Amino acid sequence: MSDDTTQQTFRPLEELSYEQARDELVETVKILELGQMSLDESLRFWERGEELAAYCERYLNGASDRVEKALAKRAGEQDEDAAADGAGED
């Protein structure tokens, strides 16, 4: 392998927002689809794409969990309110 000083360096994933990671993933796929790189460079971009896809999936799963917890909390509060409203009825 040659030491290519023009080789692109990637920002650490923890520095990226979800949107930045998603946009970089889209660009990475476009670059790979062109097929204009050496095998080594293609592998670097493919590996980066895998990292970005996993990062985005984890981010979305975390967001989904937060929404589900908020909805469950809200439903629990509504159940408590309904029970309190019905407690005085007889």
Image (cartoon, rainbow, N blue to C red):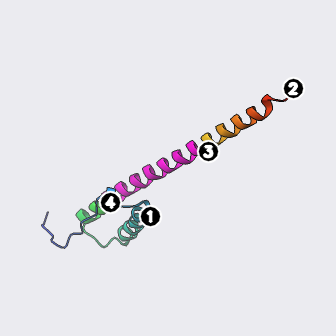
Is the Cβ of the residue at disc 1 closer than 8 Å to that at disc 3? no
- Disc 2 designates what residue? 90
Residue shown at 36%/59% (left/top)? 49
Along the polypeptide, which appears first: circle 2 or circle 3? Answer: 3
What separation in Å lies between label 2 and label 3 (alpha carbons)? 31 Å
Task: Specify the principal SS of the magenta part.
Answer: helix
- Toward the viewer: 78 or 69? 78
In magenta stretch: residue 60: yes
Determine which of the numbered discs, if any, sits on residue 71 in the image.
3
Q: Of helix, strand and loop, which one carries label 2?
A: loop
Q: Of helix, strand and loop, which one carries label 3?
A: helix
Determine which of the numbered discs, if any, sits on residue 65 in the image.
none
Along the polypeptide, which appears first: circle 4 or circle 2? Answer: 4
Along the polypeptide, which appears first: circle 1 or circle 3? Answer: 1
Residue numbers of the magenta segment: 46-71
Q: Does 82 sit left or right of 6 as displayed?
A: right
In which quarter of the view is residue 73 placed?
top right
- Disc 1 designates what residue? 19
What separation in Å lies between label 1 and label 3 (alpha carbons)? 24 Å
